[in-house]
Each structure stands twice: as C-alpha cells, then as structure tokens.
Amino acid sequence: MGLLEEEPPPPFAVRRFLPLPSLSYGLGDLHTGAPGERDFGSHVDQTNYSVVVAERVVVKWITPPAPLPHPTPDVFAHLVEAGFNDTAPPYAALTAVLDGRPHLLALVTGYLPEARDGWEWCVDEAQAGTTDFARELGRLAADLHLALSTLPGPTRAETGTGGSTGGSTGGSTDGSAAGRAEAALAEALELTGGADGAWLAGRAATLRRDLRALDAPIATPRIRIHGDLHVGQILRWRDGYAVIDFDGNPTVADADPYQPAARDVAQLTTSLEHVAQVAIKRRGTAPGRAAHWAAEARATLLAVYKARLAEKDGSALLDESLIRPFEVEQECRELIYAARHLPRWRYAPMGVLRTWYHEENNA
C-alpha cells in the first residue's frame, strides 16, 4: 500500500480520491505489522481479482489492465465531489504506461464489513416476503442519479449522434435506442430454442408493441448512468446499503454511458423479478407469492425513487414511459446472455416474461 501513499516511480501513477485509512499497527499487535491480505474466495464470481487488505481496503486488480480512458476513475472522483456516500469509499486508482499507452491497473476502495450482495440478501427477503428494503433501494438509486446527473458528458460534436451533456435534454429522436431494443429482441428470438423459443416467438408482436415507446423522441435528460445496476451490485453491509462496480455492462458492447435514468431503473426493477424467480427455483417459494413480492417491491422502489427525485427537484430525470420498454429489452438481453454464456440462467428471464404476459399464456 506504500505505493499508493507516496509518489510512485514511472511508469506508475496514482489518482487519489479520498485519503487512505491508516493501516499501521501498535507495538502490542501480535504480528509483524505487515497488513494481512486475503481474496474473496473461489465462491465469488468476478471478472477481475480483488484482495482485502487488513480488513480495511479492497484492491481490485483489473485483469487484464484496461486502456485509459476508463469510466470508473472519473465516476469515483465525481461521486466524492458530489457528496454521494452510498458506495464503498473510493480511495485511489493505480495506472501505468504499458506499450506506450496509459492503462488502469487497479482500483482501491474501502472494505465494507459483513457485506452480502443482492443475490444473497435479496433472495432472503423474497423468501420471507418482506419488502421494506425496497425503500432504501429507491432512495439510493435516486441519490445516485442526482449525483451522476451533474457529471458533464460529451458534447454533441464529440458524440456525433445528438447526444447531450450530463443534466441536459437530448431533444432528438433516439433511433439508436429503438434499434438497439429491436436488435436485442431479434437476437433473443434467434437464440432461444425449444418450448421457450416457441413461447417467445408467439409473443413477439406483443413484445414489439411494448418496445414501441422507444420510437418516439426521447426528451428526458441523458445522464451518466451506472450501466449495470442490478441487485448484485448493491451490497447490504453492517451499516446499510452500498452500490458498487461502475465499470458499465460487460455484456453490451459499445453501450453509451450517457442514457436516460430509466435505463438503470429498468435494470434494477427487472433484477427484483429475477430474485423472485431465484426464490422459486432455489428456495421453493410459491410462484404466486414470489410474483406478489416482486410487484410490491417494485412498486415501493419506484414510489420512493420518484418521491426522492421530487424532493431534490430532480423529477425531470425520469420518464416513466421508458421503463417498460427498457425492461423488455433487458429481459431479451438476459436471454442472450443465457444462450451465449450461462444456459442454466434462462429460467429467470423466461419466468419473468411468463409472469408479465400470463394473460396470453393460453393463447
């Protein structure tokens, strides 16, 4: 950790966001004074490699190192400036020049004691049928978007697509959003086989109908969104909740980081639906009870989210008419992910779609 506390030698560099906590030890400590290190264990599914140092700091090594610019350091710096604290404290980013180009080597954040991600704690809530947590998630998501909405984005000239700076309206027809959603549906239909594929094909017209809202001009502000906001990115720890991982969605190539806030909201609400499906499959929760839980949790989250935006004069950030088409697109992307990377996951998005379109199940 000494490399982060001093000016490192070339080719390394450190970008600091918050002061590192002290890792020093007193004379009475029964060890040499060197900080203990451990990883999270083989049970943790992660693309990169994270190490816990002295139960105080997490060093996430980017594997392989990522060429700069990388989204996370700028987001960390802005969240600190905006006073957003519902995340693991961002301390530093370690970079180095490799083959003549700057790369991100590691991100250093605070360790959150007793933390569990939403694929654990939220499934417990679904099994128990309790939804009080959704109030905290709604507030956290709103505060995150209020903070990110003031992060400047690329100018129109830089985007070349009518994109807007953070916190301002785009005011142009977002054909890319409609085209992206249609392409996701087409790919999901192509990749989903068997009885699930037949069921999906039989409802393709209905799904396209629900995507139609994306054909209209999107006038809501385009802000720097989280980009991969699901319950697995929200830790419940000893002192509350924290959102993590601002690297964007690794399964969507070339996704614009500046999008309507509804994109994040839709991914978060669909993840609640996925939690319900996990509770059905792995915990034996009755399907009707799980569906009722998901609907109640979703309604609570959205109500608190909207109330928090209104309280902070940020209601303009959300266009509710975009939530359902983004949710449908998200389920298509879940089917694509299942087909290409994790076939056993298909039950979750198919279960959600069957729940949403249950009135057509006998068609």
Image (cartoon, rainbow, N blue to C red):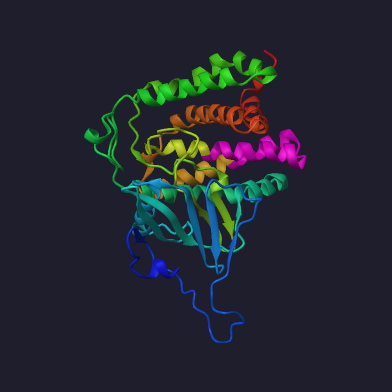
Q: Nearer the viewer, residue 252 or 114?
A: 252
Q: Establish if 334 lies above or below 6.
A: above
Q: Establish if 208 lies above or below 242.
A: above
Q: Is residue 38 in the magenta section? A: no
Q: Report the residue at 62% width, 37% height from top.
A: 274
**Image coords of residue 45 (percent x, y):** 60, 47
Q: How many marks?
A: 0
Please, what is the dominant secondary structure of the magenta stretch? helix
Q: Nearer the viewer, residue 297 or 260?
A: 260
Q: Report the residue at 52% width, 31% height from top.
A: 330
Question: Which residue is farthest bottom?
Answer: 27
Asked where in the image residue 354 lies, by quadrant, the reply is: top right
Q: Nearer the viewer, residue 279 or 248?
A: 248
Answer with left or right where residue 12 lies relative to residue 301.
Answer: left
**Image coords of residue 338 (percent x, y):** 61, 30
The stretch of residues the image draws in magenta is 268-297
Confirm whether residue 4 shows in the render.
yes
Confirm whether residue 130 shows in the render.
no
Asked where in the image residue 356 lies, by quadrant, the reply is: top right
Quadrant in which the C terminus appears: top right
Quadrant in which the N terminus appears: bottom left
Question: Which residue is farthest right?
Answer: 284
Q: Establish if 163 lies above or below 107.
A: above
**Image coords of residue 282 (percent x, y):** 74, 40
Q: Report the residue at 57% width, 47% height from top.
A: 46
Q: Nearer the viewer, residue 355 or 302?
A: 355
Question: Which residue is farthest left?
Answer: 157
Answer with left or right where residue 251 lies relative to residue 71.
Answer: right
**Image coords of residue 276 (percent x, y):** 66, 38
Q: Is residue 273 in the magenta section? A: yes
